[in-house]
Amino acid sequence: RASQGEKADNAFDSQVVQYEPAHHGSINTVTNLSPDLCVSGGTDQAVVVYDWKQGRMCQSFQGHNREVTKAICYPGSTWIFSASRDKTVLMWDLNQGDEHIQEFCGHELVVNGLAISPDGRKLCTGSRDNWMCLWDIESAKCEQRQNISRNLVTHVCWVPASSSVVQTSEDKTIRVWDSRTWQVTNTFPAKQYIQTHCDVSPNGHYLVSSSNGFGGQGCEATLWDLRQPGCKVVEYRGHLQTTACCMFLPMTPGDTVRVATSSHDSSVKIWDQNTAVCLGTLALDGAGPLVSLAPSDSTNLLCASFNNGLHHIQLDQGSHQAQGCSVVV
């Protein structure tokens, strides 16, 4: 979309380039499989591998019978894990045909949280059924499970190079788990609104979480110091509706450390991690809620939308300007 008339100093320019659609319907999740390939899932129940640089679909996995809520990949492999409202998690391998190679069953409600251990041997799942489960990937057996009242899990992530798992919840709290004992080691002070998503910095020092909200109330993302559990560093405020996703952006040496957020207000914002200054906003008018982000590298960011498929956002390191182009609509 070419910008019309005057725009704010930190508003990103955008244009639309349309490619082959990845999904029929809303997209709930997007993640990276390789520098060129992403994996997405949505209301059409499909798990799609897509070459976003070429604008073409590579594979569509069919196996869930309800919408797909989350997808993750194990770095450096062709493994894909997908969670669904059908209460299951399926494991796929891009190099092993179009059937799932493993199924993880045991949750009683929609699975919203998925995380793989750094060694690739364990899978953590979290659900609205209040259960956090730890699975052996090779056998698909549940080795540990823990139920905490009102812990309606919204997202799960594994802290890099550690045994810790972090999860957000509809009860407005953030919990840190020790995967060795499957016990909660820290619970952060409750926020005012539901915590929708979280991400951990590559060095494992920081956590960013995002909040539900409306009319600018709530709607923020929060940076926490994991070395001092419950220690809030800064807040990123500016979205007008629920902030659905928050991610640390890969950085190059000497560059500003940045955080990206996406919101139900149809905008993506880029922030200076340490000062919480908003470096730029990309408004994807008509795209509906923007619910998932996947940074491919320091200059390329993928965004999943309810109405317009996947969007590719190109970030310019030097000037903090960006050009957003819709990869799939």
Image (cartoon, helix red, strand yellow):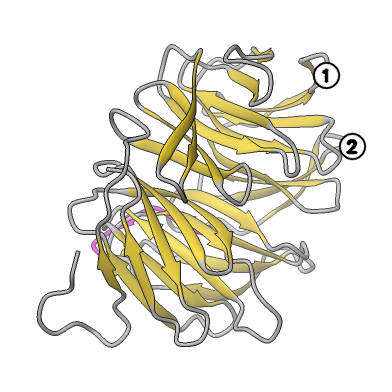
Quarter that holds the C terminus: top left
The residue positioned 34% from the left and 64% from the top of the image is 324
Residue lying farthest to the front in this orientation? 54
Q: Nearer the viewer, residue 35 or 262?
A: 35
Q: Nearer the viewer, residue 34 or 237?
A: 34
Q: Residue flagged by tag 1: what amino acid is it?
A: Glu
Quick one: label 1, few (<14), some, or many (20+) residues within 10 Å?
Answer: few
Find the magenta span and give its range.
210-215
- Asked if residue 249 is among those painted magenta in the image, a careful observer would answer no
Residue matched to label 1: 138
Decide: is 297 above or below 100: below
Q: Position of residue 16 (x, y in %)?
A: 25, 58
Residue matched to label 2: 180
Q: Is residue 169 visible?
A: no
Q: Is residue 84 left or right of residue 228?
A: left
| Magenta: main secondary structure | strand
Label 2 vs label 1: CA separation? 18 Å
Decide: is 28 above or below 227: above
The residue positioned 63% from the left and 46% from the top of the image is 34
Q: Residue flagged by tag 2: what amino acid is it?
A: Arg
Q: Is residue 32 visible?
A: yes
Decide: is 58 above or below 271: above
Q: Position of residue 306 (x, y in %)?
A: 29, 41
